[in-house]
């Protein structure tokens, strides 16, 4: 499936969003450097980079969590969980992937601190709804398992 061009209103950049975006883009660049990837491989590389970045961010922000992830089994389990959760993001057009990831990380990290005013739900909603509609039917059938993705919107009501 090809990226269909469309425009969205991207949230205003700030230090946190920019840091999350930069971390993701650095990990993705190191994973894909000097490689020719198929569309599916490239999509998976983006999801893998998001997972690796998310784990790194969690470690930096939560020392207790970092201690738990020293267990290879815990890290493996959490990685698998995030791979399932972030799979939808592979269907987001490349040009928006870093910003979608940054906004979603902001949501998951700050939600517990009631920072809703900082999170742009409209931005995520438009992009993720469209990504869901463009995803293959076999992916759409797995949506009920993805309880954290887009928990505030249409996707879980499908």
Image: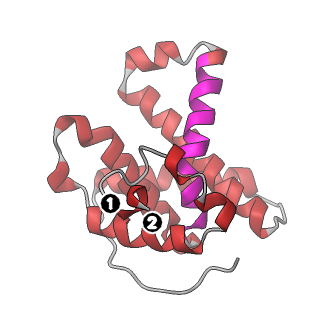
Give percent across and percent down for residue 6.
Answer: 48, 86
Q: Is residue 142 left or right of residue 10?
A: right
Q: Nearer the viewer, residue 95 or 134?
A: 134
Magenta segment's dominant SS is helix
Q: Is residue 35 left or right of residue 57?
A: right
The correct choice, above or below, for 112 with respect to 33 in the image is above
Asked if residue 77 is among those painted magenta in the image, a careful observer would answer yes
From the viewer's perspective, is the residue at label 1 or at label 2 nearer? 1
Asked if residue 147 is among those painted magenta in the image, a careful observer would answer no
Q: Quadrant of residue 51?
A: top right
Q: Nearer the viewer, residue 26 or 156?
A: 156
Specify the segment rendered in magenta.
Answer: 74-92
Residue drawn at x 61%, y 68% as measured from the top left: 135
Residue drawn at x 42%, y 29% as measured from the top left: 60
Contact flag, marks 1 and 2 (Cβ < 8 Å): yes
Q: How is the image coloured?
A: secondary structure
Which label is found at residue 153? Answer: 1
Q: Quadrant of the N terminus?
A: bottom right
Q: Secondary structure at mark 1?
A: loop
Counting residues from the N terminus, which is met first, the one under dot 1 or under dot 2?
Answer: 2
Give percent across and percent down for residue 49.
Answer: 61, 48
């Amino acid at each position: 499936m090809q990226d269909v061009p469309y425009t969205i209103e991207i949230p205003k950049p700030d230090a946190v969003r920019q840091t999350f975006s930069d971390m993701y883009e650095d990990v993705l660049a190191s994973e894909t450097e000097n490689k020719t990837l198929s569309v599916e491989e490239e999509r998976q590389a983006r999801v893998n980079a998001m997972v690796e970045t998310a784990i790194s961010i969690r470690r930096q922000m939560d020392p207790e969590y970092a201690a738990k992830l020293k267990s290879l089994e815990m890290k493996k389990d959490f990685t698998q969980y995030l791979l399932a959760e972030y799979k939808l993001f592979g269907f987001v057009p490349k040009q928006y992937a870093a910003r979608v990831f940054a906004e979603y990380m902001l949501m998951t990290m700050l939600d517990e601190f009631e920072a809703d005013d900082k999170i742009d739900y409209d931005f995520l909603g438009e992009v993720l709804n469209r990504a869901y509609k463009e995803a293959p039917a076999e992916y759409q059938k797995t949506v009920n398992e993805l309880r954290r993705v887009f928990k505030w919107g249409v996707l879980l009501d499908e």
